[in-house]
């Protein structure tokens, strides 16, 4: 598990190093070459121990395969020169995946991509549980998207019982995607801040057919509303004429009036009026 390391201040050790360098020069001047050489060697060995940590960054310290902790506090430090110091960023990162072609729940080929916002929360897991945590994020995001697409239909054209679809149920789908990715990336110490579908469309081979189907569905729905409104208007017109005794019509005349009003109200184009100069029966 991750543990925090608090190393020595680099400024203090920098002063010690410069002091050691001064002693080395003094020894060489005093012709004490053997002691001066040892002092110079100690000076050179101490130099690799210096390092710095930027804000929202960290350094994982390892000594010959033994994990010694992680430095997260920004500053200038000095540690054992034999430590290896792996830099791991703690900043939030964006990942916009490539658009992959997968089949939805009912088998339709679709193109889908995900936008992921993530950051490293456990440096030990990120450094030692997986080979390359950045590549791990990319591969697991692709796997999560493929699994998600197979759980929901793109739309409810062929699955009338589907309450959640990829196109309409974005909140539920994004929540499921975020939960899936969180479980997958936990092994690498990755915290998923946000995950959502960034691109969604039918694959090119069926996009035209599905577009025509969507248009037909929209036209049918619009016609249904038009007819429903027209029926209400005709009913209201007949009731008003009957209440006001404007004209006394039998069933045949009512049928003719209903037919004419429905044509006028439901027609796609403007209706050209026909003026009848005869009687109502001719």
Image (tube, rainbow, N blue to C red):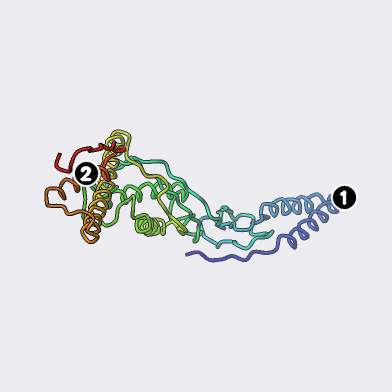
Q: Between residues 243 and 13, which one lies in front from this camera angle?
A: 243
Quadrant of the image occupied by residue 4: bottom right
Residue 151 in picture, x, y percent from top left: 27, 52
User: On the rendered structure, is 280 left or right of 58?
Assistant: left
**Which residue ends up furthest to the left in the rendered image?**
251
How crowded pointer 2 is (Cα within 10 Å; few <14, some 14-19, many 20+) is rated as few
Q: Which mark is residue 155?
A: none
Residue that mark 1 sits on: 29
Residue that mark 2 sits on: 260
Q: Between residues 237 and 73, which one lies in front from this camera angle?
A: 237
Residue 119 in picture, x, y percent from top left: 50, 56
Residue drawn at (27%, 51%), measured in percent from left and top? 225
| Label 2 SS | helix
Q: Is 266 rendered above or below residue 190? A: above
Earlier residue among tags 1 and 2? 1
Quadrant of the image occupied by residue 49: bottom right
- Residue 259: tell me if it is visible: yes
Residue drawn at (35%, 51%), measured in percent from left and top? 144
Give the total number of marks visible in the rendering.
2
Q: Is 240 rendered above or below residue 210? A: below
Residue 55 in picture, x, y percent from top left: 63, 58
């Amino acid at each position: 598990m991750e543990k925090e390391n608090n190393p020595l201040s680099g400024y203090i050790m920098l002063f010690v190093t410069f002091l050691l360098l001064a002693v080395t020069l003094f020894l060489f001047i005093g012709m004490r070459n053997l002691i001066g050489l040892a002092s110079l060697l100690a000076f050179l060995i101490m130099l690799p121990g210096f390092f710095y940590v930027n804000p929202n960054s960290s350094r994982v310290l390892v000594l010959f395969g033994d994990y010694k902790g992680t430095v997260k506090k920004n500053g200038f430090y000095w540690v054992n020169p034999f430590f290896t110091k792996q830099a791991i960023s703690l900043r939030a990162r964006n990942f916009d995946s490539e658009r992959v072609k997968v089949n939805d729940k009912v088998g339709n080929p679709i193109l889908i991509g995900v936008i992921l916002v993530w950051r490293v929360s456990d440096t030990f897991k990120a450094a030692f549980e997986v080979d390359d945590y950045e590549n791990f994020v990319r591969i697991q995001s692709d796997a999560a998207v493929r699994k998600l697409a197979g759980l929901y239909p793109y739309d409810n054209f062929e699955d009338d019982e589907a309450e959640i679809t990829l196109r309409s149920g974005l909140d539920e789908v994004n929540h499921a995607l975020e939960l899936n990715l969180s479980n997958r990336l936990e092994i690498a110490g990755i915290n998923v801040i946000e995950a959502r579908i960034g691109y969604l469309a039918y694959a090119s081979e069926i996009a035209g057919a599905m577009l025509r189907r969507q248009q037909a569905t929209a036209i049918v729905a619009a016609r249904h509303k038009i007819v429903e409104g027209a029926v209400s208007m005709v009913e209201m017109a007949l009731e008003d004429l009957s209440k006001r005794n404007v004209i006394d019509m039998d069933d045949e005349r009512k049928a003719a009036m209903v037919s004419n009003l429905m044509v006028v109200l439901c027609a796609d184009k403007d209706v050209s009026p026909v003026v009848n100069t005869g009687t109502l029966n001719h």
